Amino acid sequence: MKIISPNYIYSNNILISNIAIAYEKQIIKLAPLDELKKEFPNSKIEILAKNSLLMPGLINAHVHIEFSANKTELSYGDFMGWLYSVIENREELIGGCDASCMSKAIDNMLKSGITTFGAVSSHGMDLLACENASQNVVFFNELIGSQATMADALFGDFLSRLDASKSVKREGFYPAVAIHSPYSVHPILIKKALKIVKNEGLKLTAHFMESKAERDWLDKSDGDFREFFENLLKQKTAVSDSKEFLEYFNEHNTLLTHVVEANEEELQTISNNNHTVIHCPISNRLLGNKILNIKELNDKNINWVVATDGLSSNYKLDLFEEMKISLFSHNDAPLLEFAKALIDGVTINAAKALGLNTGEIIKGKNSDMIILDLDSEPNDELAIHLILHRYNVSSVYINGKKEI
């Protein structure tokens, strides 16, 4: 048993002071320090410095670790231009990010307070780095391939990677499944993968409606994707439309990333099926896509969370930075209310979307906690200040173990 005594605790948008936490792998009790000392007399006690703030560890629900080598190689400003640059530089980027490169990206997330992340893995090359990570990891093995003639080979590769991730037995590592997108995965593959998801109770994610090119291709088999598919894959029509794609997930709570081009009917389907939308504002801006209409999500009671995406479409894997960009992008949102929602989107709501027992500082939750060094006594606008001022993360605890 350990006891930690910060000046302040912030969780679920509630700020409390003069309360300590008794914890092991999970939080055992919150109470005044003297009360915890009496109840747990043999505990190791850690009393934190003045203006210390303890809050839940941050959760980055969507990141591509394998592309962490990118800095200036890829083209930004237009989705198709970026996609062609990814294809052109794929081998160099994948080959250029070895174990140390991926571990560095993971360590940088840890230093910024990220205690859990969802790794969307295209090739399985990041498996060892994620296995060795200090953080909790939901390891999304990605399925991709729109050509029916290649379905067996592609599914065999997917199964091999999924089985490899299942062999990881360490605490806080969860094998999962990613369906790349409606335009890039054949229905045959989707149906086969979803059988596994259902039978094994795995978490599920997919990219959905990221760009206008995707919208036009799925609606009309036309637009900017037409030349791409005809020249590279010899396809003249989309393998499925958006309605058909969403119907596959009706029985599976799914994390859908981007969703910036979704229409009214699609959003209602997402709401009806309790899916979660992953908001990646920096990625959307760099790839020339729309900003997510969060007001529309709120109006339809759609859960949304915040994530960084990968370094193929971002300049750092930092959720405080991601929240700041979102805060300024949505200039019509009430500032304090929206700041609180953003913090929920990287803590409690992200934990619920991933099905994990974390994201809150309450009894029974996993002891995933971070300590921030505030400059002064916090006030009612703490949520805004946390996002604006990027306070130093001085300590990180994961499943009760101090990692920094």
Image (spheres, rainbow, N blue to C red):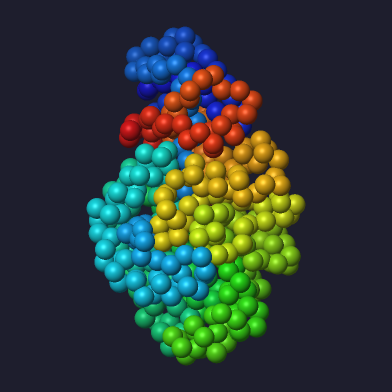
Percent x, y of residue 279: 57, 54
Q: Taking the image as drawn, is residue 176 in sight? A: no
Q: Is 312 displayed left or right of 195 in the figure?
A: left
Q: Residue at x 44, y 25 (%)?
A: 373
Is 135 rendered above or below residue 181? above
Q: Quadrant of the N terminus?
A: top left
Res 183 visible: yes
> Which is more toward the observer, 151 or 281?
281
Query: In the rendering, at what x and y percent does residue 68 appear?
Result: 35, 57
Q: Residue shown at 32%/59% (left/top)?
A: 69
| Quadrant of the rendered image containing residue 379 | top right
Give the x, y percent position of residue 387. Answer: 54, 37
Residue depicted at 26% across the width and 63% down the height: 96
State left or right for residue 189 relative to residue 248. Answer: left
Residue at x-position 39% and y-position 36%:
398
- The quarter holding residue 262 reads bottom right
Q: Give the answer, above or below, for where 78 lies relative to 370.
A: below
Q: Where residue 223 sits in the image (x, y, percent)?
A: 60, 81
